[in-house]
Image (tube, rainbow, N blue to C red):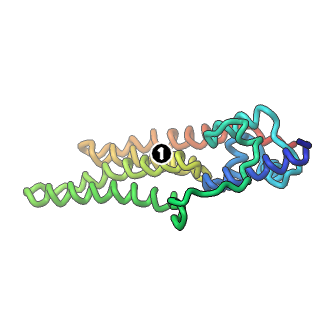
Amino acid sequence: MELSDLKLITASNIINLRTGAGMTQAELGAALNYSDKTVSKWERAEAIPDAFVLLQLAEIFHVDVNYLLSSHDAWEPKDDENKGVEEKTYSTERIIAVAVLGVWTLAVTVFVTLWLVGILTWKVFVVALPVSILTYMVLICAFHKTRYLQYVIALFVLSLFVTTYALVPNHPWQIFLIAVFAEAIVFLSCNLRIKKRQK
């Protein structure tokens, strides 16, 4: 196999795996500590990732390095029993939306149940806020949709302070002084990465 063929095969595999995971070139580049321009070069078969990057790609997409370097475009006959059966795909955005709505549906159910037995409390929704944000954060990480992750983390941290403020008697507003520093730590921690390498 010639190098040009290997570049084309690797480029095709990276494109298929990246788009299948719902990632942009920028998101994949950020995960690898490379620029989106470098990812674009790989996908245009102008360059091929080095061995370490191939290992990182294999880890991100849960495949073998051999998978990245092998052609998967060969035609394979389908079994008769599978003829006419369409392959089903799922929208990650809808899965995330259903999960978050599930948290709020549970909160409303608990609220209504307590209301029916004579207990009217809005604190259920206060607790549902960080839980729903945490659910969203976990799912966007699972589906590799981490473009705005630092903002989601910051929102989650802030929601913890809001929940604490609402649940603690006498509502100590001073906890928001701590929240300012906590938010600063989140943003600084999410931007520790050194400048992206160009190749």
Amino acid type assigned to the residue bearing label 1 in the image: Val
Q: Is residue 86 left or right of residue 162?
A: right
Point out the image quarter for the C terminus.
Answer: top right
| Residue 51 or residue 86, whichever sits in front | 86
Q: Position of residue 163 (x, y in %)?
A: 34, 47
At a point 54% along the width and 64% down the height, the residue shown is: 83
- Residue at x 50%, y 39% (from the top left corner): 182
Q: Is residue 31 left or right of residue 168?
A: right
Q: Secondary structure at mark 1?
A: helix
Q: Quadrant of the N terminus?
A: top right
Q: Given the current orientation, which residue lies at the most extreme left position?
A: 117
Q: Locate residue 89, reporting x and y percent.
A: 53, 60
Asked if residue 89 can be seen in this view, the reply is: no
Rendering coords of residue 71 (x, y %): 76, 47
Against 65, is 114 above or below?
Answer: below
Q: Is 144 above or below relative to 89?
A: above
Viewer-proximal residue, 81 or 69?
81
**Residue in front for this viewpoint, 69 or 124:** 69
Residue farthest to the bottom, as pictured:
84
Residue 56 vs 86, above or below: the answer is above
How many numbered marks, from 0 up?
Answer: 1
At x 32%, y 52%, the residue is 128
Please state which of residues 5 and 110 is positioned toward the viewer in this rendering: 5
Q: Which residue position holds label 1? A: 138
Direction from residue 57 to residue 121 in the image, left or right: left
Q: Is residue 72 visible?
A: yes
